[in-house]
Amino acid sequence: MDKRRATTRATASKVISENETLRWPTNLDRAGIESRLLKVCESARSLGLAHLVSLYADLKSMSAAELGASVVAGLTWLQDQPAHRALAMQLEMVAMNLKNLK
């Protein structure tokens, strides 16, 4: 009986971990968003992704609308490039915070 209970618990734990969602900050302000995008730029530069780097070249002077459009453009460009999924995930997290831009 104890062995069956242990197996059931292990199975339940596996299901929970497979269905667990990532917890991303959704309260980033403009400075936090810019910081994340600078990290994306650095990674993109090291990978030779000049187009992605160019989207965020003038972060400080971009309006909220321009910044949002650049994030969407970056996600669109990366959607067919599974090798760069980590960058896309960072942009997805930034996209969730675009509502905080002022």
Image: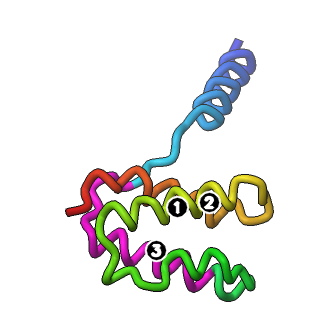
Question: Do the residues bearing badges 2 and 1 touch, measured as CB atoms within 8 Å?
Answer: yes
**The disc labelled 1 sits on which kind of residue?**
Leu
Quadrant position of residue 7? top right
Residue hosting label 1: 91
The range drawn in magenta is 25-43
Residue hosting label 3: 37
Q: Is residue 14 left or right of residue 92?
A: right
Q: Nearer the viewer, residue 34 or 76?
A: 76
- Which mark identifies residue 20? none
Residue hosting label 2: 88
Q: The residue tagged with tag 1: helix, strand or loop?
A: helix
Q: Who's the residue at 57% across and 81% down the image?
A: 54
Label 1 environment density (alpha carbons within 10 Å; few <14, some 14–19, many ≥20): many
Q: Who's the residue at 77% across and 54% down the image?
A: 80
Of the two numbered discs 3 and 2 on the same chain, state the one appearing first in sequence. Answer: 3
Structural distance between the alpha carbons of marks 2 and 1: 5 Å
On the image, the x and y values in percent for residue 77 come to 67, 61
Quadrant containing the C terminus is bottom left
